[in-house]
Image (spheres, helix red, strand yellow):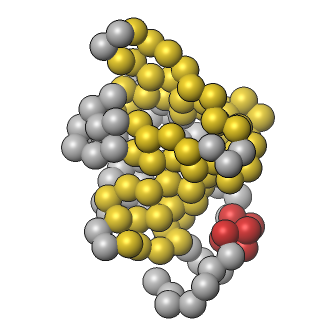
Amino acid sequence: MSNEPLSLSAALASFDALWSPRIVTRVNDYDVRVAKVAGEHLWHAHDDTDEFFLVLDGELHISLREPAGERTVRLPTGSVFTVPRGTEHKPYAPAGASLLLFEPTGTSTVGDRHDEVPSHVDATTGHALQL
């Protein structure tokens, strides 16, 4: 991690892989990650942590399975949303999006419980950013 300012645009321009986040910095015991996404992720849940999303570009939809039933939230550019710990969710971006995520270091992109991981989803705890 650098102690110099970092352009999120430069960070996002440094890779093309979808659903494969890059760690841009750490805050205490949390990773700040950026990701490019398009199409569907998979149903999954993080049992012990919330998951924070900030849409930098594009639009993200997140389907949620909650006690009251299933619903989908729509997040246009500039929107933030936190998926509560233990909530099954499935992000998808019909036309693609760029995201900033904030979650504890070591958190898997596919959570603690998940459907079968499709080949287009990188099951990772984040990759180091290579500028």
> Does residue 92 appear left or right of residue 53 in this picture?
right
Question: Where residue 44 sits: x, y (%)?
Answer: 38, 31
Question: Where residue 16 sits: x, y (%)?
Answer: 70, 58
Question: Where residue 108 sits: x, y (%)?
Answer: 36, 50
Q: Is 50 located above or below residue 128 in the figure? A: above
Who's the residue at 61% across and 85% down the image?
5
Q: Quadrant of residue 60?
A: top right
Give the tally of numbered discs.
0
> Does residue 129 appear left or right of residue 116 in this picture?
right
Who's the residue at 72% across and 30% down the image?
94
> Does residue 73 appear left or right of residue 26 in this picture?
right
- For the view shown, which residue lies furthest in the top direction? 69
Q: Is residue 116 visible?
A: no
Who is closer to the viewer here, 78 or 131? Answer: 78
Who is closer to the viewer here, 30 or 111? Answer: 30
Q: Is 16 located above or below residue 123 in the figure? A: below
Who is closer to the viewer here, 119 or 10? Answer: 10
Who's the residue at 50% across and 15% down the image?
71
